[in-house]
Amino acid sequence: MVSRDEKEHRQPWRGKPAWPVLLVLLGCLLLPASMAAGDDAGDAAELGFGSEESYDPWDDDLWDDDPWATDALAAARLADPFEPVNRVVFRFNDRFYVRVLDPVARGYAATLPEDIRLCFRRFFRNLTAPVRVVNHLLQGRVRDSGTELLRFTINTTIGIAGLADPAADSFGIRQRHADFGQTLGVYGFGAGFYINWPFLGPSTLRDSVGMAGDSLVNPASRLLLDDPRTGGAVYAGRSVNAASFHVGEYERLTKAAFDPYIAVRDAYWQYRRQQILDRGKAREAPKLFREATGDGWSDLREEEPAAADVRQDRAGALSVEEDVRRDNISQED
Amino acid sequence: MWRGKTFLPARFAFCYPALLAAAFCWLLAAGVGPTLAVAADPRETVALAVDEIIGVLTDPKLAGEENREARYGRVVVLVENFFDFEEISMRTLGPRWRELDTEKRQLFIGLFKQYLERNYVDQVDSYSGEQVVVGDQEIREDRRGNLFARVATDFVMNDQAVPVNYRMREKKGRWVVYDVDIEGVSLVRNFRSQFEPYSFDELIRRMEESIASGRELDSQS
């Protein structure tokens, strides 16, 4: 059995020089024109990103022929040196959720109609727009950053402080997630190890640094620092409102799990890695990142001839579905 | 439900000529190139299964608490047709699979199937008219000539779409699902990491307990 440390070491995110990339990136940010010109990212290839180690978790077993077995996603494992402590916190969070947050959210959901709760959710999402604007920019995605800025402007004005989302509904400009933990991941920082925070839930060392970084540009977090009582109330309100859309989900997930602690830890880890890999591979991503994260799933988003044929066969039946689908694609890219 | 009956339902009748033409092309190709899929499209398979399951869930004759058993029964039949539990079990246990003899493998497949069905089947009741949009498919072939596919779908609810991707294999002329990932979280990988710290006997024991306790709850209610 290979030790966790060793496996962690073999993942492509670790052991790569992150700082040169960061410097190249800062250089790129200073010269946005050169980015727009065509993603050559200069010496990117010489930084060693092309030679990604592939580590197959199936090793020599009979499934090593699975064409997707060597996904970078499968490659890395998350270290959990503080598992005993994390499990205690997990139990605490679990009880807090089941006994406090969930009943409150249920009562709240029963009192307020969904439309109003959706308005609040949009309001809080709009508040965190600065986080996305900054992080898209830090990830070298100038266009996405501008898009988020535009969304923020439209929704804060026409959308009445973000209660409505005319940017998406009328202009078709969709939100794209970005946060500082993800930015660090895109730069090549390893996740470190798993941390289960009281109240905040699953995180890693990197994502905790990310959360702290994001709170500097998040107005709600600033409020929490400046005026803890009001800020705390805002946070509680946001949490209850968010939870009101997911009533029962947590129970269903943990009930179906074999070991709920590991289920949540692994789901968080897979989800975060996907967010980082997606970001590296998306079409607008600078070539540097695309090389760093390799090819794969995102290619599927490109038009595929076979699928297009099927679509023509079923054109009548599918035209409505296709419109929705296209919206989703535009959201992705 | 198309098991044992016609392979394609009547609503696809308009593309039968196209399928015949395609089948003819396959015959020609088989002579020259490597044999490729003879199965229905992975995308079609997913679209069909999704339609059928939603059909069961929205069937007024199967709605309500009193029809719960019948509804779950229908869903389980559809799911067993759509998923390949042997493949799922193998991938969930990972390299440990090879050390097991046939008997233990069959034991595990049976238990894991029951375990998943017990724990997940009631989740279908949270369906409330959400739309499932079947997107693109990607097919790859491995070195042994096995065909694998990924089909992207979106589960559209409220104001957002949750991406759900199916990973499939071609087996005996049919496409079967061996993994589902929801927003990038693979079910098989998630269970593999949960099973890892436990010994095989421990796994069996805990799954049996969980299935048995589920039965007790059922008889109480």
Image: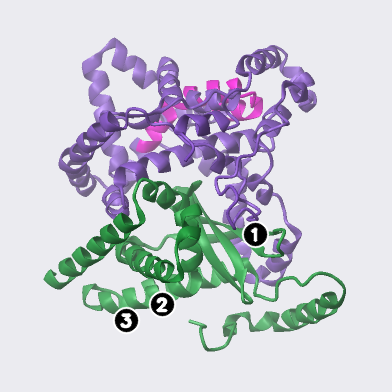
The circle drawn on residue B77 is: 2
Q: CA distance from mark 1 to mark 3?
A: 34 Å
- For chain B, the rendered hue is green
Quarter holding the C terminus of chain A is top right
Tell me where residue B106 appears, x and y as whole percent: 42, 71
Report the chain holding disc 3: B
- For chain A, the rendered hue is purple
**Tag 3's secondary structure?**
helix
> Is residue A326 or residue B127 the one in the foreground?
B127
Q: Earlier in the sequence, mark 2 or mark 1?
A: 2
Closer to viewer: mark 1 or mark 3: 1
Circle 3 residues within 10 Å: few <14, some 14–19, many ≥20: few
Q: CA distance from mark 3 to mark 2?
A: 17 Å
Magenta residues, as a range?
Answer: A121-148
Is B208 on the left or on the right of A274, as rendered? left
Three-letter amino acid code of the residue under disc 2: Val
Q: How is the image coloured?
A: by chain
Badge 1 is on which residue? B137
Quadrant of res A320 = bottom right
- Does A274 sit above or below residue B65? above
Residue at (31% x, 65% y) in the render: B125
The circle drawn on residue B61 is: 3
